Structure formats: C-alpha cells, structure tokens
Amino acid sequence: AEEGRTMKCLVFISWVLVSCLRTHAEVFTSIGQMTDLLYTEKELVQSLRDYIKAEESKLAAVKSWANKLDALTRVSTSDPEGYLAHPVNAYKLMKRLNTEWSELESLVLQNPSDGFISNMSVHRQYFPDEEDQTGAAKALMRLQDTYHLDSEAFSKGMLPGVHSNAVLTVDDCFDMGKTAYNDADYYHAVLWFQQALKQLDDGEEAAVSKADILDYLSYSVYQMGDLPRAIELTRRLVAIDPNHQRAGGNLRYFEQLLMKQLKESNQDYQPPSEEPIQLGTYTRPKDHLPERETYEALCRGEGLQLTEARRSRLFCRYHDGKRSPRLLLKPIKEEDEWDSPHIVRYLNILSDQEIEKIKELAKPRLARATVRDPKTGVLTTAPYRVSKSAWLEGEDDPVIDRVNQRIQDITGLTVETAELLQVANYGVGGQYEPHFDFSRKDEPDAFKRLGTGNRMATFLNYMSDVEAGGATVFPDFGASIWPRKGTAVFWYNLFRSGEGDYRTRHAACPVLVGSKWVSNKWIHERGQEFRRPCGLTEVD
C-alpha cells in the first residue's frame, strides 16, 4: 500500500514537471525562465510535504482510534454482559458501530485499503443501524424520566450505586438532543442540547460548534413555550454568528410573538430565569399511559402501599405443592409478597447451572419481543415492550422439562395446556409498560388459536440480579417486586370464576444498570377444572 502511494506521488510530480516543460519549451536557454522552475520545484516540494502530512495525519488518526479501541475492547470483552449492563456503554456501542466506524471507513477509503474494506464488508451485516442507535438514545431518555436522572448524571456516568468511566462527550450529548429533536420530542431535546452547551462552555473540545448547539437549543426552547429564554439564547447565537442564516429571522419572530402575547395578556415583560435548564424546568408532556407517574414512582421504590397492617399479614413457609411427591422431602421456601391479590415468591427455584443452560439455549433464538394486537390478535412489536425473547420447549433440553415439571409441582396446575417457557432479556433501558397478561372481554380471540382458554396464572422466574431498576410493579395496588436471581414469583390473573382480576395489571420497569434475564410460564384455563375449581361468586 505504501509503495502504491509513493508511485502515485511520483506520477503526480512527473505530470506537473511535464506540464511545466510543455509550457516552457527550451527553458534551459534562459536563466530567467529556469528561475521559474525553482519556484515550481518549491511548490512541488510543498505539495509533497502536504501529501506526506496528510498521510501522517490520517495514520495518526487511525492509530489514535486503534489505541483507544484496543484499551476499550480489552475492558469490554473481559466481562461483556457486565460492561453492557451500564446503559451509557450500551448507547455508545450503538453509536460507535453505527456512526464512528463508518467515519473511520471513509477516512481509510481516501486511499484504498483492501484488507480493511474486506473486513468491514464481512462484519457490516452484524452492525447496528440507525434505528438501533436511535433506540439506544431513547432508552437513555426513558431511564432519565423514570429514575429522575438529569443529563449531567448520564454524561458523567454517575448512576445510582455505579462508579464508571462511561461518559458522554459534547458531541454525544448533541447527538442525543438531535435524536429527540428529529422525533419532535423537544422536552428531551432541550435537556441534552443544554448539557452539550454546558460541557462546551466548561472547555471541553468538540466537533460540533457552539452556534449549532444554540441554534437547535433556542428553537427547542421556543417549542416548549419559553419565549424569553428562546430570545436570550438566539441573541447569544447572533453574537457568535451575525450572519447565521436563521438566527436573525428567528430572533425577530420570537420578539414579535412575545410582544403580542404580553399585549394580549396585559402583562409586563419578565426576563428569563438565570437558572440553567435542568430536569424539572419544563413539564414533561403527557403520553398514552394514564398511570405513568404512579408506575415510574414504583420503579423508583416510591409510593409503595406496603403498610404495617398489610406487612403483618405476610408470612413465609415451606410449600410442598399440596403434598407433591417431588416436594415432600424437599419443600420449597415460599414468601408472601402481597396479600390481595395473593402474590408469592419461591426461593431457590433455579440453580446457577440451570440458568446458564437456559440462557445458552435461548441466546441463538432471541428476537424482538412482541405483544398481541388487541384488535387483530396478531403478534407485533411495540415501543412499550423493549426486550428480546425466545420460546423453549421440553424437547429442546432435559432442563426445560425439569423446569416445567417443577412449576407444575409447585403450583398444582397442569402445564400441559400452558404456553412454552418464554425467556426474555432486557437490554439498555429494557422495559414492558403496564399491561395485563390475560385477555379482556374486548379481545375475545386473543388465545383462540391455542384453544386452551385464557391465561389463568403467571409463573415468573428471575434468572439474574439487577444492580438498579428492573422491578416488577403493580400500579393498581402499589407493589414493587425486585428481581432476585434463582427466585420466582407467582400470581393468578383470573378469579376462580374465570373473570379477569384487573388488579394484576403490572409492568417490568426499565433496567437502569445491569442485564435482566427472566423466564415465564403462562398457565392457561383448560385442564385446571379439578385443580382449581370454579368459585361461587364472580370474585372468588
């Protein structure tokens, strides 16, 4: 490759010399004309030095990138799951592979490098795309909302109970803001553009200019209805770049609009607050979820309704599954998590070896988790369920048969009509917003294809501990159940009458730090007629 570049340079120099000779025929007959060649040679030397400098600059950039990634990959591959447990690391991996590696590719392509391009071509099919990078960015914003974390906490990697070098640069914060901006999510756009501006004002170097940040920030602030601050930010932009193509027009428009509003409301001008924009400066817009605030509070461990009176009704015991032969000599430890509806936790349900085997079986089959469309009954992906799942059956491995049998022994319910064991892994900001496991009256055909009736009960195995976040919460009655590896929780979705227990609407909170693995068994009505007989009233 180096030899090829040298030949290109010599060809270029030869072409210039030939051009000179053609222009100045018989130049040797005139010293005056020959002196012109000296200056031509000087220009050629400068061109050669520029070429060398460009090559060295490119190689230095590539070496710097390689050294940085060499150190990073040594750390990340020593504990891949632990590294990706931090949501900032997960986001930056998406960004690196989707954006930064492509920029490096363009740099190398300035002079063809077959080996690198070949490698890129082979591995590109596995790279995340724009949708992945956007999804990871939105996950950080979701965590920001749920756990009341400001942008500075994220940019410095300061998450609850975590000490990390995972940081977001000015450019990272700006890109986060643009992701929100492009989605017309001006609430989050303001938070991230403000953080980018703060870090730039603090002296951090960046590729993005202050003018660009102010341009996006001022318009986003305007969209949030804060005209005084939008005007102040736009004035800063005009001071930096008086010839900015939009700034002058925007400033006049904002000022006229503010004057009109003040006149109509008969109010005096109030200067913008000198406090920097932060979490809480603006009100987050309402969305589709009516219990959003309750749900997120429970995810943070706030608003729990576990009173002393209720706690006094919770017990622990040994459970033998109504004298199941397999549990008589080794009963299961059972703890009450809630009294009504009754939710219990079983301890030591899965061993570490079983968990690793289940994960091993599931990983090659993991696909984006789906939800059932209430109108069509068709499975589809949804933004409120962010995880990947796989379905395992007894034929896949004896461990699945053992787990299914264990669930049957513990619950006393047949699993012959249950769905396959579903294994789920929640990635960066992974969640499943409040939902019902059973089908409601407005979706009677949800499980018609299965022919096994409604989902009577849920048996949920926790296959990992989660450093922060990831609780299972029940907004209706204010309960939060935290993941504990090897344990399982169980509850009935239906009353004995077959009517749905609407109190069991629950959610999987976003995973803040960690990798959450669960597996669950949805147990259906058919086959339970004598195992859980009907009650005499609708709510028995």
Image (cartoon, rainbow, N blue to C red):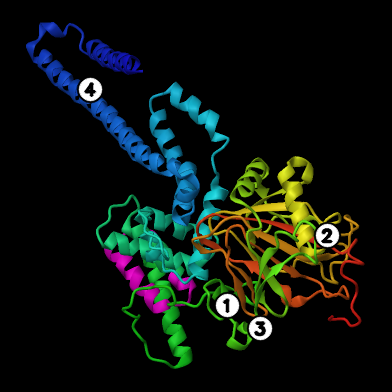
Q: Quadrant of residue 250?
A: bottom left
Which of the two marks, 4 or 1, is nearer to us in this view?
1
Helix, strand or loop under label 1: helix
Q: For the residue marked with disc 3, what is the amino acid?
A: Arg
Residue nearest the viewer, comparing 434 with 336: 336
What range of the chain is rendered magenta? 221-245
Q: Amino acid at mark 4?
A: Leu
Q: Secondary structure at mark 3?
A: loop
| Nearest to viewer (mark 1 / mark 3) | 3
In this rendered view, identify the residue nearer to me: 429 or 352.
352
Name the image quarter holding the N terminus: top left
For the residues marked 2 and 4, what is the alpha-carbon distance in whole angstroms?
Answer: 68 Å
Of pointers 2 and 4, the one earlier in the residue sequence: 4
Q: Position of residue 282 (x, y in %)?
A: 46, 77
Q: Which residue is mark 1?
A: 293
Q: Is residue 45 left or right of residue 8?
A: left
Q: Is 524 left or right of 34, judged from the image as shown?
A: right
Q: Residues within 10 Å of mark 4 (few under 14, many from 20)?
A: some
- Residue indicated by mark 2: 376
Q: Which-is-in-front pick, marks 2 and 4? A: 2
Residue 37 falls inside the magenta stretch: no
Residue 313's label in the rendered image is 3
Marks 1 and 2, Cα distance to the nearest angstrom? 30 Å
Task: Give the image quarter of residue 158.
Answer: bottom left
Name the residue beneath numbered marker 4.
48
Badge 2 amino acid: Thr
**What is the distance, in whole Å, between disc 3 and disc 4 at their CAs?**
85 Å
Query: Can you see residue 236?
Result: yes
Note whether 534 is above or below 83 in the view shown. below
